[in-house]
Structures are given as structure tokens and as C-alpha cells.
Image (cartoon, rainbow, N blue to C red):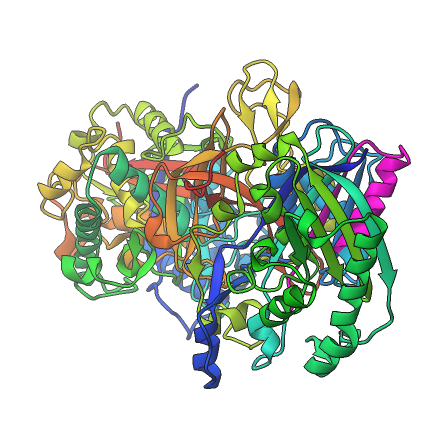
Amino acid sequence: MVGISSVGAYIPIYRLKWKEIGAMWGGKAPDGERAVAGYDEDAITLAVAAALDCMRTTKGALDGLYCASTTSPYREKQNAAIIAGAVDVGNVECRTADFAHSLRAASIAVRAAFDTVNSASARQVLVTASDCRVGAPKSKFEQILGDGAAALMIGSEDLLATLEGEYSVFREFTDLWRTQNDAFIQSAEGRFIEEAGYVPLMRESIAELMRRYTITPGDIAKVVFYAHDGRSHASIAKALGFEKSQVQDPLYSRVGNTGSAAALITLIAALEEAAPGDRILFANCGDGCDALLFRATERVSELRTARTMKDRLSGTIPVSYGKYLEWRDLITVETPSLPERSEPSLSSRWRERRTISSLYGVRCLKCGAPQIHPNGQAVRVCVACQAKDEFEMYKFSDRTGKLFTYSIDHLQPTKNPPGLNGVVDFDGGGRLVCELTDYDPACARVGMPVEMTFRKLSQGEGIVNYFWKAKPRNELARP
Amino acid sequence: MEGIKDKVAIVGMGCTRFGERWDMGVEDLLVEAAYEAFQDAGIEPKDVQAAWLGTVFSGVSALTLSPVGLQYIPVTRVENMCATGSEALRGASYAVAAGICDIALAIGVEKLKDSGATGVKGPAIVGDNTDGSSGIGSGFSAPASFAYLGTRYFHHYNIAPEEGKRLLAEIAVKNHYNGSLNPKAHFHNILTVEQVTKAPIVAWPLGLYDCCGVSDGAAAAIVVRADMAKSFRKDPLYIKGLAICAGARQGTMHQAYDYVHIEENVIAAQRVYSEAGIKDPRKEISCAEVHDCFTTHELVVYEDLGFSARGKAREDIDAGAFTLKGELPVNTDGGLKCFGHPLGASGLRMMYEVYLQLQGKAGPRQVKNPRLGLTHNLGGNAGGGVGCCVIVGNEKG
């Protein structure tokens, strides 16, 4: 039996109100908002955050990591390997793969993970789905889209939900697309998409799944499905014959359509609210349809007391439309007076790869002091007792800490000024001088609890320079 | 270990006007400072037997000094961040003390304003990650790390932010007043506490007037054997102590460090006092030039150098202990804050002021009956720096 053994999600802290967009372009906008990835986030960093959220409760190394996204920062270079490094999979043989190009990429990856576990090629496979899609300014997509990520651990033991049925079809249908040269999503006419593509495809696929497994709408506790926007989501629910109470809210007016992550985020919210024995029908759409049937186990009730979607959505920070444009590189702004970081040296990054990818430092075997160099220099001599080369590796990325001192830095080159940087003292020992992110500068204080988060430090002409920053711990979030 | 005390003397000094010297390149600044020093010492350029040139960004190798026109002598370019000028003086002093040469030039220069940037650009070094060539080094500003001192000091001593800002402002106000009396200083404006506390924030808690000037300038000293000094002038300065120390950046990596002091300052001070035979610096030192790159640093330096007891700098500031008329005048020429901070020149600029003070030539800034003067630099920043102290006196023995 295969199924889902753990779930994780990550929604960026920043929100752009629909009314801000309306005010910019003169249109009328209803109440609602969309999640906006920070200037230092992308599909990879979002996926890392969701993956770490998912891995908090799992045991053992990963045998596979499948990454789904339509907005990979690299056209050539694997996302999954970067994510595997950052989450420290602890297994060099972990199979990594990217699933790309389709809004259905996440469920394709999930089905591949089920097959991998079913064939006993892997014990557990982590699937991430993340997207930062950009609609053209003034287009409807600007409002509809949101940024976010989900992660599911697929396995065969300690399951939260088991897979009871699956049905997939592909369909060559051109509704949304981006060519290699398109910065923004292109789309066919809305009613054409609905009437010729989306509605019949969803209806037929769900009907076929229910026929094959002899299920009626009454057997389903919650139905989770993808739609391009909230209006289309509401209309299809009705067309499929489900009661309003059966339909899981896709969070489109709070987070937005998160692309390849949207259906998984909705599924996770449904699981968190599910009772043992509940059946959840899942349908994801894009170049075809994946319809899956899940049944919640006894363990599902553990999710209610863990970090839930409500916790993940609390404590947001509003952003202005101008900031949104700047963060997504949609306008050219004045360059900061202090130069950005120089392009990193690849060989230097390679030497310090464990520090850079998963924030490993060392712990002195003689005096026990954990330590990490703020610039990523190798530590060969203990800063506390001067013992030479007597260390074990020590991971800081999963350590919480407290802000020992800080500065609100108006000169720091950042797209979210003023910068905040400071000295983080880790619980359990060790100290790192680093940047912070996702903060309200007014809330900075000595002793502020922080945790580490994988971000883009800079991106020039060369590689994306990922590293770890500290961020205030969301104190509403339960451990 | 004998130490440097009374082995060498400074018999001539020069210092350019500091500031945004759009009119002068590195070569002009070097020539101006060097020739003022030659003239002051009563020597010709050909008399110089060896030279130490300090600069952080404004040139590499001995050839940076070539505009001065010295002929086929050993020239060593040194760099030790903001302690670079003092490092040049140390090289010259130790060579003379060792008897390798009798007349040496120590000169420091920095031309910061040709960079086009408002602040100071970091060095381009590849290989050891001192600049984070891995790409993960600090992306924040130089003021930020000194802001950490302020944030933590306020917290540590339970000082409300507004009161802390006022305290820092008193330091800036003092240094600007002193600088206003100095024609060679970068700035000449007198500030009020209110102007300082209400200035735009650069890196909280540091505002614009808590930060030193980014300046161009050069300063130079002629160092000779102490027993020859009186043949050059009647009022030479004798080096009494010279200490420099670098930590292992343990402060940035280990929780033991408190961010309310700087260990490298403390150790450099202890060593220099020991070498110079000073027991009570507050009473024995007549005037001090300390590294006030940011007001937070001057605040902790009072305590690091033993001018104030730990945690008591506030009381001394409020008592006016470090003003021109105070018990121990500090930064009588305006300091880095107001005189300006061309990195490689600053250590020697400080010595230039102490030189004038101990010779009684400081004009309206003159302190009474000075005997011993101190200069102090910190290269780097809180948690990992290079501390440097030099003590000079106007009498031998």
C-alpha cells in the first residue's frame, strides 16, 4: 500500500492586495490578495521551504526527490539536485528528477513517486511543487496568480492517506503557454478554454475515476481540484455535482493560483481538515488530467495539532505594487550606491559546498563548540580551544536561534530596504553574522527568535547565488 | 623582550588637508604629505633610507610611492585595513630600532573619492573568502557591524534608544567642535545634539552624523634613531610603545563575545601600556586620538582603553571628560568623524595631531602641558579586527 506519509507547504509572507493592482490600473477589484515571493525567493527556495516543512516529522534518508515547477530559475541545471543539497537528503544515491513545463507537473511527479515506491525502487520519495509565475502587468494573471510551494512525502509506511485509485489522461490542448522567448503567460480566450478544454476534460476524467472505483459524489468527503481562477473553480464544482461543503477552498483569494503547486496546497489543506476514513478526490489539470482518490488513515488527525495551513498563512506583510514590480524585475530602478556582491567563485563555492547548501559548520570534538565561518571559510582551528582538525560536521540550517544584536541597515543593497542584519546565536551553541529576511523592521529587537531559511543572496550575470538567511520565527506557528 | 620604548623618534611630519579632494590624485596627496614631512624634519628626499607605504585600496606595491621621487631605496607597501597607517609607522620604527637604517619614512594614503560610490567598497580578494569569494560573505554595509555595538550596548546597559542616541550624539558633537578648529579637517561644521539625533539613519542606531567622513588624504612621518633625534629638532617625539594585534574572528563565531567591547582594542592597549610603563592611562595620557569611525566605537573605546571603567563611559561623556578642556581630551583634531578617514592615512594623521599637541603647536585645540599622547586604530570590525595602539612622549625616559 502506498500513500502520503507527510505533508509540507510554504506560502511567502508577502501579500499584494487586489485593490492595489486595481488602483494602479484603474479597474475595480474585489477584496482579495495574492502571495508574492520575496525578492530573494524563487521556485527553488520556495520548494526548499516546503520540503523542510514536510521533513520535520519524517524519519530516515530520502531515496528520491522529485521537483515539479514551470518556473525553474535554470533552463539547464537540475532544480531537484539543488533542493536535495539544501534539505540535506543524507543519501548520495537519492534519485533526483525535475518535472517541468506543465501545470500538471506536480501530480505527474506524485504518480511517478507512487510508482517508484510501489516498485520497491525507493522506500520514500519527496515530491515538491513550486511556482513563481509572472503575468504581464495589467493582465488578469497579475491578480490571479500567487507564489507558493507544497511538498508531499510518498511512501508505504506511517501513512496519513492511502492511494485508493488513480486515472490519468493526456490531452494536447493549447490553453496557457510560454515559449522560450515569453516573459509572461500567454493564453487562449477564456470561454474557449472553459468550454472546449477544461470543463469537459475534468468532468470526463473525474467521472471515469469514479466509475472505475464505483464511487458516487456522496462517498467523497472533500474534493480537491485545480482551476485557473476562483470563478472557474466555483463553476466546475457545480458542474461536477458536488455540494459546496464538499469542495476544498483552493485559497485563490488569499494566496492566488500557485501554478503547479496549487492542487497540492489544496490537497494538504484538505488532509489537515480530514477525519480518519475520509475519502478525498483529487484532480489536477494541465495538458491532460490526473485524478486520484485518497483515503485518510487514523494518523491524519495528527495533522490538526501540527502546523496547519492557517498557521502558514498567518503573519503576512503587505507589499506595494511598485515593490512587486521591482522584485519581479518588471521595472528598471536606480541601482544601489553600494555595489552588489561580486560574482561568486565556483571553485570556492564547491570547496565550501556543505556550508553553502545546507549550512554545515563544525563542532569541536575537544571542547564541543559548534562553529561556522560567516564568509564560508573552512574552519581548521577551533575558535574556542585552538584544537586543529578535530571536528565533526554540524548542521546549523535546522537550528533555531536568537538575535544577539542587529542593525537596520539603510545602505545594505536589497530590494526590500531597509536591510536588517545581525548576529544570530544558535540554540545549542554557535554564532553566525548574517542577513535577515521576511521581517518588519519595526519588530527587530535583541533576543528575537529566528530560524534559518534558504534564499537567493544575489543574482548577477552568472549563477543564482543561494545561501541561508535568518528570519523571525512566526511565533503563531506551533512547533 | 626589550620593546620599542625610546629607541626611535619622530622628527618630522606632514599631513594634507583631508576631504573630497577632487583636485588631487594619489600622487599629489603622497607628494604633499611627504614633502611637508621632509621640510619639517629638515631633510632632503635623498636622506631617506627606507620607506613604508600604507594604503588599503589606492595602489599596490612599492611603485605606488614612485611619484615622491625617492631613489632606489627599499619601499614596502603594507596593508592592515583601517590600522594601515599605523602599520606603516610600525614598519619604519622597527627597522630603525633594529639598526637596519637610521632615517625612514612612514607614509599612508587613500584616495576613496574616485570610486564614484558614497561608501567604501570592499577589497577584491579571491581565494580565502575574506571577501566572501564564495558569494556568501556579508552583503551589508560597514556601518552595520559598528551599529551592532550600539544596539547591544544599549541592551546590555539598559539604555533607552533615545538616550543611547543622545549619548552617541555627544561624541559626534565633541569631535565636530574640535574639527571646526582645524583647517586641515574634512568638515568644519559645528553640530548640535539635536542635529545628530535627528539626522537620517544610515544603519540603526547610527545616523548620518554618527559616521565618519569618507575622505581623501595622506600623512607622513620621518622616523630616526632616538639618539640622533635632537640633531634634527629640539622637540622630537619619542615612541614609547607600539602594539598591534589580530584576533581569530572568534567574536563573530562564538557566543562568548559580548559586542560591548572589542577584545583586540583591549589587548593592544594592555600591551602598549605595559611597553610604555603606563599604570593609569586616564591620568597619565595627555591626549588621545582614537578610532571613531562610528560614534559607537568611540563609546566602547573609552572603556577598552581604560579611559572609563566598564559601563561607565556614559558618566564620563556627560561629565565632559573627553572634551578639549576635559580630563583626557580625545580626538582633539576632530577625529575620523570630522577630520575624515582616508583609510591608509588615518593612523599617521592621528600621530600628526599628537605631534602638534606635544610640541605645543595645536593652536586653539592645544591641551595643557601634554607629556604623553596615544593613537589608536581598529581595522576590521566588532568580533574580528586588528587593534593597534601607539604611545609617544615629548621627553626621553
Point out the image quarter for the C terminus of chain B: top left
In the rendered image, the residue lying farthest to the top is A366
Query: Which residue lies at the image location 30% right of the left edge and 27% below the top edge?
Result: B273
Q: Looking at the image, which residue is at 21% across and 31% down?
A: B311
Q: As rendered, which of A9 and B158 lies closer to the eye? A: A9
Measured along the vertical axis of the image, is residue B236 above or below residue B283?
below
How many marks overall?
Answer: 0
Please state the horizontal and vertical placement of residue A476, each as a whole percent of the image: 42, 42
In the rendered structure, the answer to whether residue B237 lies left or right of residue A60 reads left
Instruction: Tell me where residue A9 appears, x and y as whole percent.
Output: 60, 47
The answer to whether residue A413 shows anywhere in this view is: no
In this picture, is A399 found above or below A104?
Answer: above
B324 in magenta: no
The residue nearer to you, when weighing A255 against A469, is A255
Q: Residue A126 in magenta?
A: yes
The answer, for residue B72, to whether it is visible in the render is yes
- The magenta-colored residue range is A106-133
| Residue B79 pos. (x, y %) | 52, 46
Give the residue drawn at x 60%, y 47%.
A270
Q: Quadrant of residue A277?
A: top right
* B342 sits left or right of A72 in the view: left
Quarter holding the N terminus of chain B is top left
Please tell me which residue lies in front, A16 or A253.
A253
Residue B68, x across and y down, in percent:
50, 61
Q: Is residue A295 above or below residue B61?
A: above
A441 relative position to A204: left or right:
left
Horizontal side of B120 relative to B370 (left or right) equals right
